[in-house]
Image (cartoon, helix red, strand yellow):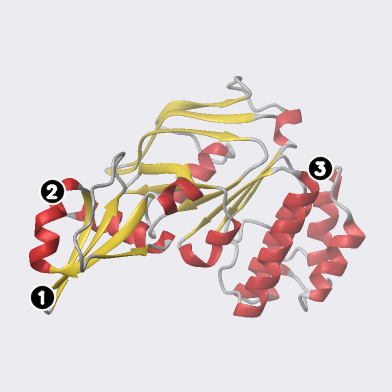
């Protein structure tokens, strides 16, 4: 499967509009970051793509087809933070059953990786802490080596060491399989070095979608005395403006032609999280 196309997807939960006419195309062989605040619509979108829930309107096209057949299903894997597995299932049993559906799933290798994370394969899922359950579900998801893997809050409850180990595992699987991995999280700066493509979602709408390098290089800060900033402010698309003791800092989107800057104005790089937070605040106004 080469593409998944999301076409005008909306989802209502009674009076709540969770997704609002979302359009998106996921291509093979990329790592995406689906980034947003809690309640932004990330989980709902992934559940619809994975055919866990139905949209209120719109459709999903899997290689141009609306039907998710058995062959296509084996090319998708969705991991969510909710404990949807039978609670009395043991870790080893979960791995075994997964191996029966996903042919690339190497049971012995997965059990060894989980052991390296300190997970006892004989434990039942309901005996695992939140962090250990997140490790199990995320490692199992990656080891399916499916063409499209969707990880919803994969590091929920992880400590810093295990998060780093998990991110290394993401990169290892991606290098070996060249598959598509979608990471949905609010830990933006922490995963930014993994990403190729970035999708910002807020209030059920995608408001920015681009290559990570394009986003980073097209946004930067201008900082200087308020009088000088006022002279050039109208020349830019300002995302956020901060004032402090006579100095002003603007987060701007780079125009096609960059005007000359007066003396005393400094430029600095904005992080992915800076950019996301600024856009989110602007949308709240």
Which element carries disc 3, helix, strand or loop?
helix
Position in image of residue 39 (x %, y %): 37, 56
Q: Nearer the viewer, mark 2 or mark 3?
A: 2
Q: What is the quadrant of residue 36 in the picture?
A: bottom left
Q: What is the quadrant of residue 230 in the picture?
A: bottom left
Which element carries disc 2, helix, strand or loop?
helix
Q: Name the N-terminal-most of marks 3 and 1.
A: 3
Q: Is residue 208 above or below residue 23?
A: below
Q: Nearer the viewer, mark 3 or mark 1?
A: 1
Question: Is residue 235 left or right of 60 when viewed as pictured?
Answer: left
Which is more toward the observer, 61 or 210? 210
Cα separation between marks 3 and 1: 63 Å
Locate the C terminus by quadrant: bottom left
Q: Which residue is mark 3?
A: 101
Which numbered dot is residue 246? 1
Note whether residue 95 is visible: yes
Q: Residue at x 71, y 42 (%)?
A: 179
Q: Is residue 99 above or below residue 55?
A: below
Say how many tags the image has.
3
Locate the N terminus by quadrant: top right
Crowding near the residue tagged with mark 3, few <14, some 14–19, many ≥20 C-alpha atoms within 10 Å: few
Position in image of residue 255 (x %, y %): 29, 43
Which is more toward the observer, 245 or 210? 245
Crowding near the residue tagged with mark 1, few <14, some 14–19, many ≥20 C-alpha atoms within 10 Å: few
Q: Which residue is mark 2?
A: 234
Cα separation between marks 2 and 3: 58 Å
Q: Name the N-terminal-most of marks 2 and 1.
A: 2
Q: Is residue 91 above or below residue 181?
A: below
């Amino acid at each position: 499967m080469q593409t998944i196309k999301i076409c005008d997807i909306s989802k209502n939960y009674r009076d709540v509009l969770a997704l609002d006419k979302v359009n998106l195309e996921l291509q093979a062989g990329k790592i995406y970051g689906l980034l947003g605040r809690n309640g932004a619509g990330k989980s709902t979108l992934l559940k619809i793509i994975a055919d866990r829930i139905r949209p209120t309107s719109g459709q999903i096209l899997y290689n141009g087809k609306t039907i998710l057949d058995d062959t296509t299903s084996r090319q998708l894997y969705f991991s969510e933070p909710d404990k949807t597995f039978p609670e009395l299932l043991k870790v080893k049993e979960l791995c075994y059953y997964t191996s029966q559906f996903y042919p690339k799933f190497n049971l012995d290798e997965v059990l060894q990786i989980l052991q390296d994370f300190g997970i006892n394969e004989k434990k039942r899922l309901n005996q695992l802490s939140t962090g250990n359950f997140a490790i199990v579900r995320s490692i199992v998801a990656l080891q399916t080596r499916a063409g499209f893997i969707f990880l919803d809050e994969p590091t929920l409850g992880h400590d810093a060491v295990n998060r780093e180990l998990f991110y290394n595992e993401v990169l290892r699987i991606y290098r070996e399989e060249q598959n598509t991995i979608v990471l949905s999280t609010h830990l933006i700066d922490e995963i930014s070095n993994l990403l190729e493509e970035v999708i910002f979602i807020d209030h059920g709408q995608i408001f920015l979608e681009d290559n990570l390098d394009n986003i980073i290089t097209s946004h930067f800060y201008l900082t200087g005395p308020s009088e000088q900033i006022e002279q050039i402010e109208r020349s830019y698309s300002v995302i956020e403006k901060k004032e402090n003791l006579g100095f002003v800092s603007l987060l701007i989107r780079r125009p096609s032609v960059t005007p000359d800057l007066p003396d005393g104005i400094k430029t600095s790089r904005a992080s992915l999280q800076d950019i996301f937070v600024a856009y989110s605040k602007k949308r709240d106004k």
